[in-house]
């Protein structure tokens, strides 16, 4: 009932907010969001440390006559935001400035991670005085049926609500606030069936195997400060309780290529399981198309108590680099040391290394194509070294039809808690494909998606007595309400 109330609340509240265009378009000088000078001889003015970037000239204006508006001082930003909000046809996503640097907010994903500049920036964008607020969210009713002797069926609700706000701070600074909650704990401590998924515990005593754990109620509560150094450079500091350290690609529920799928990747604990970390501090430097950042954070994953806030501890570290060579591409490389990540194995540490590339391309009116390829290695100490990879894609056609697929391969060592296969390294591959049809709910920014997903697996013969014959093993049906800025 709470999940339904959340969906109804989004639908009732959304019409009072301002929807925006469906896609974050690349600005003429991207990446880096460089603003051309009024005349060739004039020096290039620096970007303001404000929440919004100046609007560009209309495409109908001949290039020779194009003169960008002057950059307003910080104390005029509130008035400029309101004026821009009233402009018909303005692409707010492209105009909004990132929380952590002088580039479009479309580049920023979960935590402090990057994605391609052309990524659609969904949700609702609302100016409020000197602040610019954004609201994202979805609520999904899911029927999940995982086949085989170790599968199961369950109908449950997933949900997420995220709010972000930013404003100018001081002469060249930007203050950012982020909060994200989920009602996933209502699905129960043992989460939902997902064959070959491992990681964490439901009761504090047993491994959670062939199931995906629910996320904590409090998924992010973070603040950031970015200082504009000029010439497209920025220094920033991010802290969260909880938050997301600088490790891995953007997490799957915020990754443009994976967010349409109703289920988590089985490689979640290879790539992005640290996206809810109770204690993280990240410092970074960005310059145009690249950035470097490092984090100190708590290595232990959240426990089975999903409603509480856990004590912070900075006992682990990570470093990560991003490079966006073009508006459609984003490369990531990271490594990190996780101190005692698993509650049931407190003496085991992990060195995790990941690499990924994400591509995004807008396709005509409200269409979009995105894909991600990622690789990861977990060196458990003591323990084995386990690798995994994934390739996923999402194709959106005219904001109505969404096709999505994911192929992944992981080396599992936690599928069997006892017996002759205990701690055996077992390679598992999975292929899933799905479709969703989206339609707007009235004139507001809430959209309803109706869809389904089917999955097939490949695994060694030696585990067939437990899992049965390889092949098509599972399917999922879902109905999702999501805040979006698409109007078609």
Image: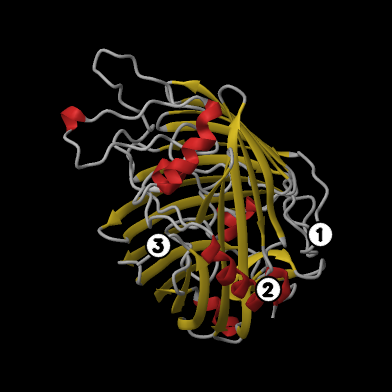
x and y, in percent, of residue 155 in the image: 62, 84
Q: Quadrant of the N terminus?
A: bottom right
The residue drawn where x is 62% and y is 41% is 336
Query: Is residue 461 depicted above or below 68 in this figure?
Result: below
Reply above or below: 350 against 98. below
276 relative position to 145: left or right: right
Task: Name the residue at 80% across, 44% down.
Answer: 312
> What residue would you read off at disc 3?
486
Instruction: Pinpoint residue 89: horizontal percent, then vertical percent.
Output: 34, 51
Whether residue 266 is visible here, answered yes or no, is no
Residue 143: x and y, percent?
A: 56, 83
User: Mark 2: which secondary structure?
Assistant: loop
Q: Is residue 481 above or below residue 66?
A: below
Instruction: Say whether marks 1 and 2 touch (CB < 8 Å).
Output: no
Which of the two marks, 3 or 2, is nearer to us in this view?
Answer: 3
Which residue is disc 1 drawn over?
A: 308
Res 191 label = 2
């Amino acid at each position: 009932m709470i999940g339904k109330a959340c969906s109804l609340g989004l639908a009732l509240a959304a019409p009072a907010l301002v929807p925006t265009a469906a896609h974050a378009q690349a600005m003429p000088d991207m990446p880096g969001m460089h603003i051309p000078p009024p005349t060739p001889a004039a020096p290039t003015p620096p970007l303001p440390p404000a929440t919004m970037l100046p609007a560009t000239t209309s495409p109908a204006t001949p290039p020779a006559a194009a003169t960008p508006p002057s950059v307003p001082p910080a104390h005029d930003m509130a008035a400029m935001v309101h004026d821009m909000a009233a402009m018909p046809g303005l692409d707010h996503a492209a105009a909004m400035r990132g929380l952590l640097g002088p580039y479009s907010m479309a580049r920023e994903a979960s935590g402090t991670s990057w994605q391609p500049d052309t990524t659609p920036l969904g949700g609702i964008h609302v100016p409020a005085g000197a602040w610019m607020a954004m609201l994202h969210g979805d609520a999904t009713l899911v029927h999940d049926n995982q086949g085989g002797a170790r599968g199961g069926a369950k109908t449950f609700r997933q949900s997420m609500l995220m709010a972000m706000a930013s404003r100018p701070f001081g002469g060249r600074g930007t203050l950012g606030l982020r909060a994200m909650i989920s009602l996933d704990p209502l699905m129960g401590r043992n989460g939902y069936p997902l064959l070959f998924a491992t990681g964490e515990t439901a009761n504090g005593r047993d491994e959670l195997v062939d199931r995906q754990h629910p996320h904590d109620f409090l998924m992010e509560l973070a603040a950031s400060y970015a200082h504009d150094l000029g010439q497209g450079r920025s220094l920033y500091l991010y802290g969260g309780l909880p938050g997301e350290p600088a490790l891995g690609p953007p997490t799957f529920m915020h990754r443009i290529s994976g967010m349409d799928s109703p289920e988590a990747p089985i490689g979640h604990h290879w790539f992005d399981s640290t996206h809810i970390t109770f204690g993280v501090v990240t410092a970074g430097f960005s310059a145009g198309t690249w950035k470097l950042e490092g984090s100190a954070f708590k290595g232990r994953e959240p426990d089975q108590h999903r409603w509480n806030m856990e004590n912070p501890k900075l006992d682990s570290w990570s470093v990560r680099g991003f490079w966006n060579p073009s508006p459609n591409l984003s490369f990531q490389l990271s490594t990190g040391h996780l101190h005692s990540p698993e509650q049931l194995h407190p003496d085991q540490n992990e060195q995790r290394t990941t690499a990924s590339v994400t591509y995004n391309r807008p396709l005509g009116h409200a269409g979009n194509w995105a894909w991600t390829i990622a690789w990861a290695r977990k060196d458990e100490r003591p323990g084995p070294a386990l690798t995994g990879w994934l390739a996923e894609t999402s194709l959106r056609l005219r904001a109505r039809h969404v096709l999505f697929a994911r192929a992944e391969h992981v080396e599992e060592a936690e599928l069997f808690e006892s017996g002759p296969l205990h701690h055996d390294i077992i390679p598992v591959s999975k292929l899933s494909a799905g479709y969703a049809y989206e339609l707007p709910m009235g004139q507001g920014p809430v959209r309803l998606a109706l869809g389904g997903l089917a999955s097939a697996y490949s695994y060694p013969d030696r585990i067939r007595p437990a899992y049965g014959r390889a092949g098509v093993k599972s399917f999922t049906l879902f109905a999702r309400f999501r805040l979006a800025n698409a109007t078609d």
